[in-house]
Structure formats: C-alpha cells, structure tokens
Image: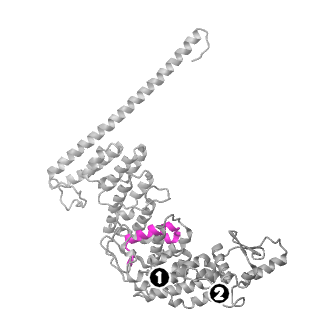
Amino acid sequence: MKDLCDLKVNINGEHTFYLHQRIVCNYSGRLKMLIKQEKRRALPENQGLQISGFPGGAEAFELISRFCYNNGRIPIAPSNISLLYCCALILEMTEEVSPCNLLTQTEYLMDGLCYWSWSDILASLKNCEQCFLLAESAGLVDRFISALFTKISANSEIPLLQLQTSSVTPLPSSSSSSSSPDTVGFRCSSSKTPDSMKPCSNGEWWFDELTILAPPVIEKVMHLLGCYGSDNRNLLLTRFLLHYLRAAMQRPCFEYKTEYAGLADTAVHGVVLMGRTAFSCRGLFWVLRVVSNFGLSRECRYKLERLMGLALDQATLDDLLVSGGTEGTGVYDVNLVLRLVRVFVSSEEGGDAPSQRMKKVGRLIDKYLAEISPDQGLKVQKFLGLAESLPDGAREWYDGVYRALDIYLESHPNLSTEERTSLCRCLNYEKLTLEGCKELAKNRRIPPGVAVQALASQQAKLQIKTHTSPRNRPDPSETPRLTYQSRHEPTTPDEFVDEKEELRLNLYKMQNRVMELEKVCREMKGQMSKMVKSKSFNYKSCNHSSSSRGMPRLC
C-alpha cells in the first residue's frame, strides 16, 4: 500500500488525497516540481503537499486524479470544461509534460465554440464562476460571453449594440394611468411589476436565461459591451439589469449583498439617461423599489429621485406608498416623498399663479397624508413637514388636510395639547369650506382655541361676502371685486344671513365651552389655595399647643 500511495496531497485544507507519485507526475509538471522541492527541504515523510486556493476544491482535484489514473482520458462536457481548463493551467498539464494532455483536450473542444448550442455556452460560462479570476485572466470568460451574445444577435430582430439612447422613440408625457406598455420603454399602468418591464418581445428572450449567472459575470458582460456604470447608454441592457436585479430579490434566502451595487448603479445611469422618454412616473417608482435593495450610491439615488420628482404630478397614491424599510421612519418612507415634493416645488417656482400640475400634486399629497396618518411611527414634525411642504396656492381647499389631521389625532390619542395645537398650524382656516369648519368646531380632539380661531376666520369671510352681496353690494368703481368664492357659496342674500346666524351660534357655543373650562380652572385653583391655607393653619395650631404644654414641637 505504501508503494501505491506514496504521495499525500491536501487540497484547500478540506480533503487529503493519497496518490501514486509516478502516475500524477506523468501529467502534471507543477506537482512534479512541488515534490522535488519537498524532497530538498527534507521534511517529515508523512507531511505531504499542501495546495491552497485550488479552483473547484476537492471535487475538481478528484477529476484531475481520475484523468491521471485513466491514462489521460475523462469525460469533458460543457458543465465542467471551464473548471478542467483552469485546473490544467494551474497544474501545468501541457504537451511538454505529456502528449494530448488535459489542457490540449479542453482547448481543442473550445475551438469549436461557435458550433455549440446556447445552453452549452451558458453552462460553460456558469462553470467559470468556480474559478472566475483565473478564467478571466486566461480569457475564457471573454470567449464564452462573446459566443453568447453572438447567439443573441443572431436570434434577435434588433442588434444588441444598436439600441442606444438615440434610437429611443420619445413617448407622450401623459399620465401613467392612461399610457399603454411600449415595446421599447417602461411606460406602464399597474402598481405591480409593469408589463413592459417583463421580457416579452423577440429581443428579450434571453433575459430569464442569464439570471442564473453571478454578479461578477454580469459585470464582466457589461464591461465587454462598454455599458458599465455611467457608460450605460443601452436601453435593452438597462431593461435586462432591472430584470436581473428583480429576479435576485425573489430568490429564497436572498441577502442584500454589496456585489450587486455596481449593477444597480449601472441600471440607474441607464434609466436617468433615457429619462421620461422611456420611463413613466410609475415605472420610475418601480425602478426605485428594485434598486433600493442593493446599496444604491448617493449620487445615483439623487439623480433618480430628481427624475421622479419632476414627474410627481403623474404619480398615484399607490406609487407613493413606498415601504419605510430600515430607516426607522415608520411603515412608509415619508422622507422620500418629502424629497420628491421639494424637487417638484423647486421646478414650479417662478410662476405667477399655481399651475394645474401643482394643484394636482396638492390633492395627491392630501390623499397620502390621510393614508399614512394611522401609522404609529409617524412623528408630529414629520406630519407637519409634509403638510407644509407645498405652497398655499397648491390647495384650493384645506378640507383634505383637515381630514388627514383628524385621522392622525384619532390614531394618536396621547398627544399633548401643545402638540395638537402645533399640528393645527398646517391648516389655513380661510380655505376651509363651511362644512369643514363646522366639523372642526364640533371636534373634541381640536383644541378650543384653534376652533374659536377657525370660526372667527370663517365668520370674517362671510361678513365680507355679505357686504358684497346683491343687497349691499357697493359700486364696482369704488370697491374691488372679490375673486375668492366658496365651493358652497349661497345663491341668495337670505342664505347668506342664515349661514351667518348659524356660524354665530357655533361661535357662541364654542365661547361658552371656553368659559366653562376657564371656570373649572378657577375652581380648581380656589380649592388648591384653600388646602394650602388649611394645612398652614393646622401647622400653627400644633406648634401653639405644644409650646403651651412645654413639649417639643413635633408637627
């Protein structure tokens, strides 16, 4: 047994092989050299060879051993040819050591790479992942990628590298809810994965096939095609990267690994370069949901959010409901919406009057506030910041803000009076409808002072309208005509009077409520002062009685 197994080889500290020196040295120049070096060092006989960093580990070395013991023959297939080629390079299994050695056999098979099937090329490229650095330095990865995309170009209507930014057909900047999926862009109408983002056209049949490859291989693909990072100007490859990242998210036990970060940045560069000619607002929100899971760089996030903010008027409520993730801001990512609103508002500044786009965003933010108000993680300052992020002209009426505020107060019953009062700061009482003002006045969750202020503001507004009604309207040449009109403006002078009387009655009730609270406070203060005086009197009486008896004062 000693003569048959006179060589001990440990691979990567995982497994030890007992081999015959003469057999393996007939095919491996590297092992022959290592054995000679060990003999010169005069090391203990049983120590053997230690080989670390061997590609494929013990399984790959077992294939090499079988090749040596089988007189230089072993089944070579696309699933193992890459690994065998790299092992042959490391162990120097060349023609100089033995004729028709392993390196020669693998090279001979790869010479016919152009005749291989798509699945064989893909399997060989996948096999390179076990020895990626060595396969890349040997040019093996480049050969397989070139062969792969030769197959893609041969089976696609549009050559891959011709689909650049200049060939993207601009699409109308209509709302995403009414746009249909385009065969080139990402314009979609669903809050789920947009149909136009799924590989469906003739040029995208390979999307699903390449999702089995590891991120380093995909990065190499993008580098070879000249579309990595900020150089990405290819819409089709951008679509593929988004599909690849989405598929990675859906794998079981997926971890947010940093090795995907470069691909996420590359995808965003492509999206930003295409802009809204290829991506609807909803499509941009979908892109953000995908790439946010892969450590997106600050620069790319800023560019993507700016593009989204400029198209915020095309967004829907479902688009804005982005999960808060790990930022600790609650269920929803309110900070994201705040940033988008700031971008949109800054782009609309300078106009004489609020545009229809601004008013549309105002209605959208009111709906968003009402939706996120029950969130227990939503802080008072965050609610206020979002409610006050739009200029006053963005809202014709503030009833939507009031409804969201009421939901927030109902969902957060432990707020102090100061906090509830500060929350009401986001309301413009003059822009509350009469119904909204009535509800506010009756709402027990609203501080009394705020309710009185709202009713007084509403009363002043109605007084102005009463003075300008047909019964008491002055000469137009003397008084400027008011352009502000209430949604529920009375049509006759009698209705003006009725509403005015009703408002006065509500104001009177509110004033009585305030007076009752003040009265209770005065009574409580009086009771407290009586208790203090009574305690002081008992203290003096106790001291007087003790001194008259000659006893020490213990009271």
Local SS, label 2:
helix
Residue occupying image coordinates x 48% and y 75%? 211
Query: Where does the N terminus fall, quadrant-wise?
Result: bottom right
- Specify few, some or many for label 1: CA neighbours under 10 Å numbering under 14, 14-19, or 20 or more: many
Residue occupying image coordinates x 35% and y 73%? 188
Q: CA distance from mark 2 to mark 1?
A: 39 Å
Part of the protein shown in magenta:
276-301
Q: Position of residue 322 (x, y in %)?
A: 42, 62
Residue that label 1 marks: 233
Q: Position of residue 355 (x, y in %)?
A: 32, 68
The colouring scheme, among rainbow, by chain, secondary structure or one colour, is one colour
Q: Main secondary structure of the magenta part?
A: helix
Residue that label 2 marks: 103
> In the rendered structure, are the residues bearing label 2 and label 1 in contact, judged by CB atoms less than 8 Å apart?
no
Please tell me in which quadrant of the rendered image residue 167 appears: bottom left
Q: Residue furthest front?
A: 1
Task: Evaluate whether residue 139 shows in this view.
Answer: yes
Q: Amino acid at mark 1?
A: Arg
Q: Is residue 248 above or below residue 453?
A: below
Viewer-closest of 162 and 347: 162
Q: Residue furthest top?
A: 549
Q: Is residue 477 above or below residue 159?
A: above
